[in-house]
Image (cartoon, rainbow, N blue to C red):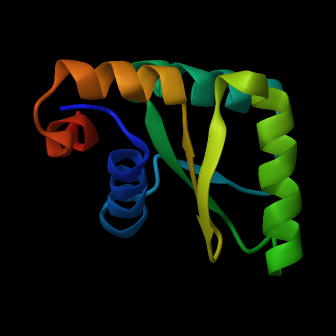
């Protein structure tokens, strides 16, 4: 499968709607162990869904602030795919493209 923008967008939408969150961010907020755990998941899967709990984010501005802080700590390694409600999809473009070129079906990538 040729990895292009439309396929990546479709994967992001699928993860956002179908997958359960891989990580939940709560009252401890973003700390070094959490960032390292997110990096490890991104290196193995290429994409991750994160849920921000109500006790840390009461409104949309809080969610955006937390997602930007997370993006800043992850650096150029990852990008924010989509924010919907208190859920965020983050993906590593290089790893996701490599997985797409290896697999024929993007559903296999999501299930791994």
At a point 48% along the width and 42% down the height, the residue shown is: 48
Image quarter where the N terminus lies is: top left
Residue 23: where, in percent of width, then height?
55, 46
At a point 38% along the width and 59% down the height, the residue shown is: 20
Q: Residue furthest left?
A: 104
At a point 79% along the width and 71% down the height, the residue shown is: 55
6 with respect to 23 (left or right)? left
80 with respect to 3 (left or right)? right
Residue 75: where, in percent of width, then height?
79, 26
Residue 107: where, in percent of width, then height?
17, 46
Taking 4 as reference, is 103 above or below it? above
Image quarter where the C terminus lies is: top left
Q: How many marks?
A: 0
From where the camera sits, is residue 56 visible? no
Taking 99 as reference, is 67 above or below it? below
| Front in this rendered view, residue 31 or 93 | 93
State which quadrant residue 64 falls in: bottom right
Taking 85 as reference, is 13 above or below it? above
From where the camera sits, is residue 97 visible? yes
69 with respect to 48 (left or right)? right
Residue 104: where, in percent of width, then height?
10, 31
């Amino acid at each position: 499968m040729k990895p292009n923008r439309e396929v990546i967008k479709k994967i992001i939408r699928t993860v956002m709607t179908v997958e359960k969150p891989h990580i939940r961010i709560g009252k401890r907020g973003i700390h070094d162990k959490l960032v390292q755990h997110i990096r490890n998941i991104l290196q193995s899967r290429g994409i991750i869904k994160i849920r921000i709990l109500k006790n840390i984010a009461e409104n949309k501005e809080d969610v955006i602030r937390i997602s930007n802080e997370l993006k800043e700590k992850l650096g150029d390694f990852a990008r924010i795919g989509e924010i919907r409600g208190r859920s965020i999809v983050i993906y590593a473009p290089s790893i996701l493209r490599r997985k797409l070129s290896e697999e024929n079906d993007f559903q296999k990538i999501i299930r791994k």
